[in-house]
Image (cartoon, coloured by chain):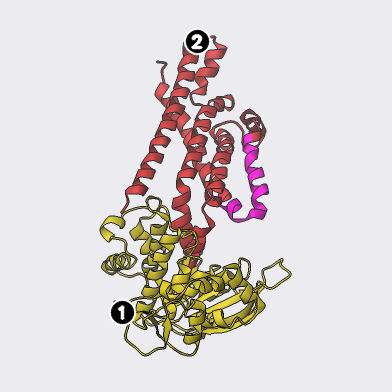
Amino acid sequence: MNSPAGAPVRFERVSVRYSGSQTEAVDAVAFDVRPGEFVVLLGPSGCGKSTLLRTVNRLVVPNAGRVLVGDKDTATLDAVQLRRRIGYVIQAVGLFSHMTVAQNVAVVPSLLHWDRARIDARIDELLHMVRLDPARYRDRFPKELSGGEQQRVGVARALAAEPEILLMDEPFAAVDAIVRHALQDEIAEIARRLGTTVLFVTHDVDEALRLAARIAILERGRLVQYDAPLRILTAPAAPFVESLLDTHDVVRRLSLKCARDAMQPPRDGAGPDVREDVSLREILNDFLRGAATVHVLDGNARRIGSLSFGDVVAAVASS
Amino acid sequence: MPPDFWAHVRVHLGLAGAALAIALVVAVPAGLFSAKRAAARPLVLGLVNVGRVVPSLAVLTLLLPVWGVGAKTAIAALALLAIPPIAINTDVAIRNIPMAVTDAARGLGMLPRQILWRIEAPLAFPIVLAGTRTAAVEVIASATLATFIGGGGLGEYITTGLQANDTHLLLVGVTAVALLAIASELAFTALLQFAGTKQRSRA
């Protein structure tokens, strides 16, 4: 089944103020998300990242500014129709406990009046996609599933009607680290394969670095930096970004690990050579200069491995 | 067995059933309203609780000048008694649905009425049914009082038995009411279990 390519999203000076609050929860935030791009909204709790996310499917209506989805101002669209084009995954999953896995996944296709055969085929396809065997899981109820399995169903439900955009609000915060890493890898792979635009909220710097093509960092409702992970690491645009990286110890971990710790089997391709004991932090400079691959040499100048930026982040994040 | 026994049982169940039906029609929307409007909750639940605080006998006496003697007054008094457990359980059932569930439902593009009928109603149903079970037992037991205002039912055996010092008749009335109450409790419990398994096995 062919999914439509992801839609672009544009925030134009979006502000949100909750009634009874003195300050803006989101304050004149503006940035663009390209079709099919994986963007992470990063910041501490209360920074407005979830609020900003919820303006995209109009669960929150901005007080000022515009949110454009696929070049259309969402204020001019019917909110319910809009939501059916946008997948939505939340931390607490929110599965419907009186429905089976299959019925949960089928919610949006049913709302869209797909015929029975198409829905059934789609359920099996989606369960395969999130690595749940349809034969075993279709007819189970949510309370019979582990936390990780529930979130897989949550992801399948969000993807059911081939959304152009997937909104994920701290989706993996409640599952343990091993399951979280597996789910991160899978969602990255699914989004890449389907071409879906993803907006992903987290407070976890490692998760942001692992997943994002670009990271939007929010502090008290304001956008302080919007950049690729490499740029965030090497050129933090504000003291707040530095302190965010500090609290998560990312830079120190980059300094402590060396090329040998992160390298993968040697690959072909042009790229500078580094010695195996060079720290990952120094290697970031090579990526900054535009290298896609860095080759790792041992003491005898033999090539023993290769590294991409993704490998560096994975090595740091898994520690 | 006294003559007309089954007729009395029928009248008794009729009174209780009518009262329960009226109570459901009033209490479920009232509970729903108080669950959705936090500001209105104290008022709604306060009003509803009147039925619990004022003794049924007093209600009968108060309604007597308005509607006179007969079944209508008795049913109204009994309905008042049945409303609180149903309304309170409806309120609690709806408020206990996790925020995440309704948030997800909205985010997936469900209309408010779809959320109500497809999500909230089925999730709340078992708790509302449990409240109805409580109400049914209370109403069956209290329908005995209908006889004081000429509403009939099994209470007649009890009042006549007391006045005529007829222990046999008294016991017939008391036992029949007790058995009906127990039977209703068991029936509702079975219904609850059936609803539970049906919900769990539906593919």
| B73 or A88, nearer to the observer | A88
Q: Is A92 left or right of A293, judged from the image as shown?
A: right
Instruction: Tell me how far mark 1 sits from mark 2, CA to CA.
Output: 82 Å
Q: Mark 1 is on which residue type?
A: Asn
In magenta, the rendered stretch is: B32-52
Where is the C terminus of chain B found, in terms of image quarters?
Answer: bottom left
Q: Position of residue B168 (x, y in %)?
A: 46, 11
Q: Residue at x 54, y 42 (%)?
A: B86
Q: Splitting the image into 4 quarters, where does residue B147 fall? A: top right
Q: Which residue has dot 2 on it?
A: B167
In reply to whether residue B42 is colored magenta, the answer given is yes
Q: Which residue has dot 1 on it?
A: A2
Q: Chain of mark 1?
A: A
Q: Splitting the image into 4 quarters, where does residue A27 fall? A: bottom right
Q: Which mark is residue A288?
A: none
Q: Position of residue A103 (x, y in %)?
A: 35, 59
